[in-house]
Image (tube, helix red, strand yellow):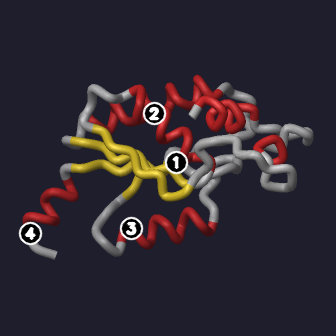
Amino acid sequence: MNQEAADNRQKIGYLYINGLGNGATTAKDRVVRWWWKRKGVDMQHAHVNWYDGKSFVDKRAAIEKKVHEMLGGFGGVAVIGASAGGSLALHAFSGLKNENVCAVIAHGRLRAGNYHNRNSLHHRAHLDTPKPSQSFYDSVTRA
């Protein structure tokens, strides 16, 4: 890597939004961080708890606040959403359209789809369980 590329990487902050879960760092999250670190990218993990009962609006506001904090130390921020974090990254990006921010959707659900099995949005959001993620459901349906 040449020096100019290294300098440019330091000018950009990277915020990773995890998929469904309680926000704890998973094995997949560690692999993602390791993979990016190999290329000199140090990502911050948003640690989104999709089951904490907070609304989608609250989660979006928390991501937008974190991005604004990061913009104080970086010239720009890349918001990287994985799985459930994909739709949240898209929403945060739309709320930050006047900032130097980009969104990267590594993979994620951006619409409900017409599934009638275990892949249905209702099932994936665990709406029929004691620990539903209404915020994930709302994030996808609003995307």
Count neighbours of disc 1 (C-alpha within 10 A) and say few if under 14, some if 14 to 19, many if 20 or more. many
The residue under the point 86% across, 50% down is: 116
Position of residue 96 relative to residue 35, above or below, is: above
Quarter-wise, where is residue 118 in the image?
bottom right
Label 2 to label 3: alpha-carbon separation? 22 Å
Foreground mark, 4 or 2? 2
Q: SS for tag 2?
A: helix
The three-letter amino acid code for the residue at tag 1 is Ile
Mark with earlier residue (4, 3): 4
Expressed as whole percent of the image width and height from the top left, the position of residue 3 reads 8, 69
For the N terminus, the quadrant is bottom left
Q: Nearer the viewer, residue 55 or 74?
A: 55
Question: Mark 1 sits on what residue?
Answer: 17
Question: Mark 4 sits on what residue?
Answer: 3
* 19 left or right of 32 in image: right
Is label 2 in contact with label 1 (beta carbons under 8 Å)? yes
Foreground mark, 2 or 3? 2
* 24 left or right of 38 in image: right
The three-letter amino acid code for the residue at tag 4 is Gln
The residue under the point 70% across, 45% down is: 113
The three-letter amino acid code for the residue at tag 2 is Ala
Question: Mark 3 sits on what residue?
Answer: 36
Mark with earlier residue (2, 1): 1
Residue 92 circle label: 2
Is label 4 in contact with label 3 (beta carbons under 8 Å)? no
